């Protein structure tokens, strides 16, 4: 033991195991909160579309094939994220980096589809100010898009950090896992939005 | 840490990564199932079936996708119960509140004549 | 060697009998961490110590209690006589808006946070919260939000002097301070009807929401994960239980108002139609979303007070809390049901028979667990050896005054009666009995109970008796007549009234009462200052109390417990002092490992400071000041940079080795 009491590597602490559970529980609480958050946004959209069914016909601009494609892309990015987390648990940094790049790549494709969609809709006359449909649609899907963008940025940071040599299975698996939880949540919110916002418009009488 | 490429967890199992390999297969299968379901949903809305039937099936499929991603990709099935409770409470409160709000602000509860003047 | 009066961590520690110098380490970023700093200001800004953070919350909250109180006194003075012209109608609107917003978000919530912060880790036998840097972030985020919400006063002063005029989105409006009520009903909050004051309110509340959310999540993880060995959930003090329930309420209630405020901001800044009638928006939706948050919010305000009382009543009756399990369970039921009653604020909006009946019944139901708690508190006093120390006097005041507020609340729950009471002074009477008679008296009880532990100094003299007399008398003289004023038809939120309705005498009495109450608060502040300046050391356990925080020194050492306690019973300290051998507290052996302390950090402060340009930038942009959009973007970048650096620097930490025989 040295004479000077200085900071030391956190790994030696007996409560390091506790920290793993802390971060995970924190993220699940945040996701529970985010459930209420997106729930409010989606409810507002559903309420207004029932009150004013004739105010705007979304089928004029909706392109279900494109949206299905972007939904599929996001689901696949979730799959790659699960693989990335698994790789980090095993300490396989190269595999981790490959998979995380895949998630980022797919996430960017999803965002591009969203941007294209928004631009297309705006050209066709559906804007933020187009009665309540435009307002609720853009705020809800826009908020989701911002969540995706933050996730991509987070994963990029993890990717670059993995090159610094300071990442290893023991310390960093939990950080990757927590990022993974966030990414999966963003995916399942989209699952709900895809059904409740897009698919529902195609069912007559709903 | 000089070896940046491989730093395994200290585990006492005979094959420390057996659990991870099993998970890999689960992930692949789940990804395939999710893709298939999305395809089914896409086709279903174009089918000339009864509306209520389509709506119910879509609801069930989405619910399955939702729960499946949480349980397997997000690992909740294998984690401590407290995590499920933390997330689940949010889900229950959100669902309850917004179903109630849906009834409170449904067309039957709102004076449609007064609000549809445009 | 002991350091009983250290506010700053001494840059030395003792190990194996030797005094060693501690040097701050470099973080992974390469910067030197601000540990062991000799500058008092830097030490307090970068601290992650829950005790210091709690004290800062408390001091700032008491300041805003005074601000809100001054706003109230001006309101009451304006209303003392009919057709008074002390303040204009617009100024009056701003005063009651800011009075409500300040008291709720800048006084009560941070006072609760002060108690959570200081007590919870000590009560569960932990060294600090789960995420010390997030704790610091929450504190400075609160300060940022407080600045943004109150910044409008500065601009209003300029406007009054003729030096400032709104332009851009809010051209033509003269309000820079929020003026639309603390609940901001649409469509009044649209740019058609209000100026930049509403934007300051929106941005300030969003910032405060983020601060509250992060603190709440921090406390849940702390309570669930970091209890000492043997501290089972059902052995925790009731105050810690209430902290847990309140934190869960915050986590699930705040998103509703976050979305509502976001939708309102988009209406004002980007032309959406969420609450704009011409575009199809439904202003009633705002009311729903606001109260889906707002009702849990009032339980967030009151449950901590109930937790404090559940600690003081047993301590000063020398008896365990009557029905501990039921009290905890009732708290949980209140929290859960609190999400199901929001539309009782909307009985007069035409919800329909079914909805009105449903919410009326649920509201009556929520009175049951509340009543259960009151019976349990009375049961605690019954047969106990009651000591009428200051905390007990205020706790008794709480039980009685809160009950009165509860009675008027139950009267509200009946929808037909509500139709007469809604928007009248009857409602004001109800919630002020709860807020002042309930929450404020409980907080004062908590201050009298725990301040000696926090600062190591004992109270001097009996000024507390006079604080109690003036507060309780003032509260009743101010708010009891308001029950009658309300039933006589006086509406809320009107800057003046005509003579001849029979309201004049009541209003004058209420105003006199307000000044009596204000004097009581003044005496409280004087008493607190006297305590700080008294020379009497408090000792570890001046009240012969029951829970674990009293097992530490006063003030507690920076590391709380030299060795982790092992708990064997509920009311751990009481059992240790007077119980059988099997229920005593024992301590873990630390194997010479020393105590791991979290490092201090600049990053949470940097990130929260970024909220100020963000909030002010958006609001000033709405006021028409050029280039403010860039200021807002700069704020966003600052927040992001703070968070990224925070993540990269890592938690760090250093070790302390206290004396062998210290506990």
Image (cartoon, coloured by chain):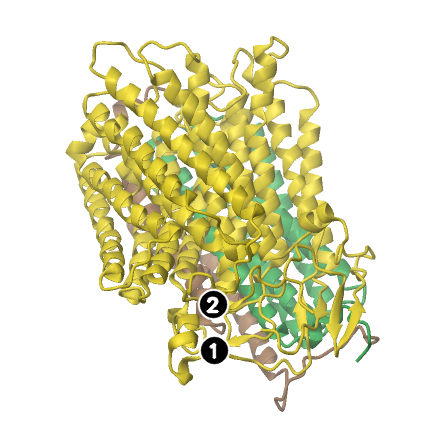
Chain colours: A green, B brown, C yellow
Do the residues under discs 2 and 1 have CB atoms within 8 angstroms?
yes
Which residue shows up at 56% across the image and 35% down it?
C146
* Quadrant position of residue C403: top left
Q: Position of residue C569 (x, y in %)?
A: 40, 76
Looking at the rendered structure, the number of numbered marks drawn on it comes to 2
Q: Position of residue C35 (x, y in %)?
A: 74, 58
Residue C276 located left or right of residue A155: left
- Res B61 seen here: no
Q: Residues within 10 Å of mark 1 (few under 14, many from 20)?
A: many
Q: How far apart are the two marked residues, 2 and 1, measured between alpha carbons?
A: 9 Å
- Res C50 seen here: yes
Residue C585 is tagged as: 1
* Quadrant position of residue C347: top left
Q: Position of residue C17 (x, y in %)?
A: 75, 77
C88 relative to A18, above or below: above
Residue B64 located left or right of residue C510: right
Q: Residue furthest left?
A: C416
Of residue C482 and residue C212, the one placed in the foreground of this image is: C482
Q: Position of residue C610 (x, y in %)?
A: 67, 39
C253 relative to B57, above or below: above
Chain of the residue on which disc 2 is drawn: C
Which residue shows up at 56% across the image and 69% down it?
A21
Residue denoted by label 2: C548
Of residue C487 and residue C171, the one placed in the foreground of this image is: C487
- The N terminus of chain C, quarter of image: bottom right
Chain of the residue on which disc 1 is drawn: C
C501 relative to A176, above or below: above
Of residue C143 and residue C69, the one placed in the foreground of this image is: C69
- SS type, badge 2: helix
């Amino acid at each position: 033991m040295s004479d000077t009491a200085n900071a030391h590597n956190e790994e030696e602490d007996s409560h390091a195991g506790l920290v793993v559970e802390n971060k995970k529980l924190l993220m699940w609480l945040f996701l529970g909160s985010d459930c209420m958050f997106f729930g409010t946004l989606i409810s507002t959209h559903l309420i207004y579309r029932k009150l004013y069914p004739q105010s705007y016909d979304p089928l004029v601009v909706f392109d279900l094939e494109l949206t299905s494609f972007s939904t599929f892309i996001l689901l696949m990015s979730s799959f790659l994220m699960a693989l990335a987390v698994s790789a980090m648990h095993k300490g396989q940094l190269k595999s981790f980096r490959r998979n995380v790049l895949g998630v980022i790549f797919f996430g960017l494709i999803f965002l591009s589809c969203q941007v294209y969609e928004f631009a297309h809709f705006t050209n066709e006359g559906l804007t933020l100010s187009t009665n309540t449909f435009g307002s609720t649609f853009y705020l809800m899907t826009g908020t989701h898009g911002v969540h995706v963008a933050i996730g991509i940025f987070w994963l990029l940071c993890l990717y670059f950090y993995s090159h610094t040599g300071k990442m290893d299975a023991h310390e960093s698996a939990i950080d990757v896992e927590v990022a993974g939880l966030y990414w999966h949540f963003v995916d399942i919110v989209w699952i709900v939005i895809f059904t409740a916002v897009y698919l529902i418009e195609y069912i007559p009488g709903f | 840490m000089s070896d940046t490429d491989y730093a395994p967890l200290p585990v006492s199992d005979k094959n420390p990564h057996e659990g991870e390999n099993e998970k890999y297969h689960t992930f692949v299968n789940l990804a395939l199932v999710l893709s298939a379901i999305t395809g089914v949903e896409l086709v279903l809305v174009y089918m000339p079936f009864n509306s209520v039937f389509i709506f119910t099936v879509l609801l069930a499929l989405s619910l399955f996708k939702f729960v499946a991603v949480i349980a397997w990709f997000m690992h909740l099935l294998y984690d401590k119960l407290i995590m499920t409770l933390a997330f689940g409470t949010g889900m229950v409160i959100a669902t309850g509140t917004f179903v109630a709000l849906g009834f409170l602000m449904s067309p039957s509860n709102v004076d449609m004549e007064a609000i549809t003047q445009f | 060697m002991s350091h009983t009066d250290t506010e700053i961590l001494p840059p030395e520690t003792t190990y194996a009998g030797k005094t060693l110098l501690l040097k701050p380490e470099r973080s992974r970023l390469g910067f030197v961490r601000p540990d062991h700093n000799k500058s008092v200001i830097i030490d307090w800004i970068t601290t992650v110590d829950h005790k210091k953070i709690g004290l800062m919350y408390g001091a700032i909250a008491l300041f805003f209690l005074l601000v809100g109180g001054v706003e109230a006194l001006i309101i009451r003075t304006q209303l003392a006589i009919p057709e008074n012209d002390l303040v204009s109608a617009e100024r009056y609107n701003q005063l009651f808006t800011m009075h409500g917003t300040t008291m709720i978000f800048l006084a009560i919530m941070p006072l609760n946070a002060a108690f959570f912060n200081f007590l919870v880790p000590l009560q569960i036998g932990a060294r600090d919260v789960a995420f010390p840097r997030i704790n610091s972030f929450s504190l400075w985020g609160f300060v940022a939000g407080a600045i943004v919400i109150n910044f409008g006063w500065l601009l209003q002063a300029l406007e009054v002097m003729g030096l400032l005029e709104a332009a851009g989105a809010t051209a033509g409006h003269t309000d820079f301070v929020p003026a639309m009520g603390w609940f901001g009903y649409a469509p009044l909050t649209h740019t058609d009807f209000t100026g930049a004051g509403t934007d300051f309110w929106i941005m300030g509340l969003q910032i405060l929401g983020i601060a509250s959310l992060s603190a709440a999540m921090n406390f849940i993880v702390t309570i669930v994960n970091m209890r000492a060995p043997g501290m089972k959930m059902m052995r925790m003090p009731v105050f810690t239980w209430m902290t847990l329930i309140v934190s869960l309420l915050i986590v699930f209630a705040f998103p509703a108002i976050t979305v509502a405020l976001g939708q309102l901001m988009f209406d004002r800044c980007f032309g959406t139609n969420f609450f704009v009638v011409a575009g199809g928006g439904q202003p009633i939706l705002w009311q729903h979303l606001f109260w889906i948050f707002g009702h849990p919010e009032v339980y967030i305000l009151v449950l901590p007070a109930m937790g404090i009382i559940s600690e003081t009543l047993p301590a000063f009756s020398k008896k365990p809390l009557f029905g501990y399990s039921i009290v905890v369970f009732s708290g949980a039921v209140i929290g859960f049901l609190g999400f199901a009653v929001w539309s009782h604020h909307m009985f007069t909006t035409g919800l329909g028979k079914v909805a009105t009946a449903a919410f009326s019944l649920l509201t009556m139901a929520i009175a049951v667990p509340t009543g259960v708690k009151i019976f349990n508190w009375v049961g605690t006093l019954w047969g106990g050896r009651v000591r009428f120390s200051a905390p007990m006097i205020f706790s008794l005041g709480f039980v009685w005054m809160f009950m009165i507020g509860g009675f008027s609340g139950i009267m509200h729950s009946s929808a037909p009666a509500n139709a007469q009471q809604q928007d009248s002074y009857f409602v004001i009477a109800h919630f002020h009995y709860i807020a002042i008679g309930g929450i404020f008296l409980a907080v004062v009880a908590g201050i009298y109970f725990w301040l000696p532990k926090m600062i190591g100094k004992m109270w001097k003299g009996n000024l507390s008796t006079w604080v109690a007399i003036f507060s309780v008398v003032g509260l009743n003289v101010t708010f009891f007549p308001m029950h009658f004023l309300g039933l006589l038809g006086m509406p809320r939120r009107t800057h003046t009234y005509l003579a001849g309705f029979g309201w004049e005498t009541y209003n004058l009495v209420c105003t006199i009462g307000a000044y009596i109450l204000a004097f009581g608060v003044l005496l409280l502040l004087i008493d607190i200052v006297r305590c700080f300046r008294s020379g009497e050391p408090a000792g570890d356990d001046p009240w012969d109390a029951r829970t674990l925080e009293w097992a530490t020194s006063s003030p507690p050492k920076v590391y709380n417990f030299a060795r982790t306690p092992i708990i064997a019973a509920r009311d751990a300290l009481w059992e240790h002092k007077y119980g059988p051998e099997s229920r005593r507290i024992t301590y873990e052996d630390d194997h010479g490992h020393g105590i791991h302390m979290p490092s201090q950090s600049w990053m949470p402060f940097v990130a929260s400071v970024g909220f100020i340009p963000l909030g002010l930038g958006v609001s000033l942009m709405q006021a028409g000041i050029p280039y403010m959009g860039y200021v807002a973007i700069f704020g966003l970048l600052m927040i992001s940079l703070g968070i990224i650096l925070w993540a990269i620097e890592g938690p760090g930490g250093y070790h302390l080795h206290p004396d062998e025989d210290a506990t």
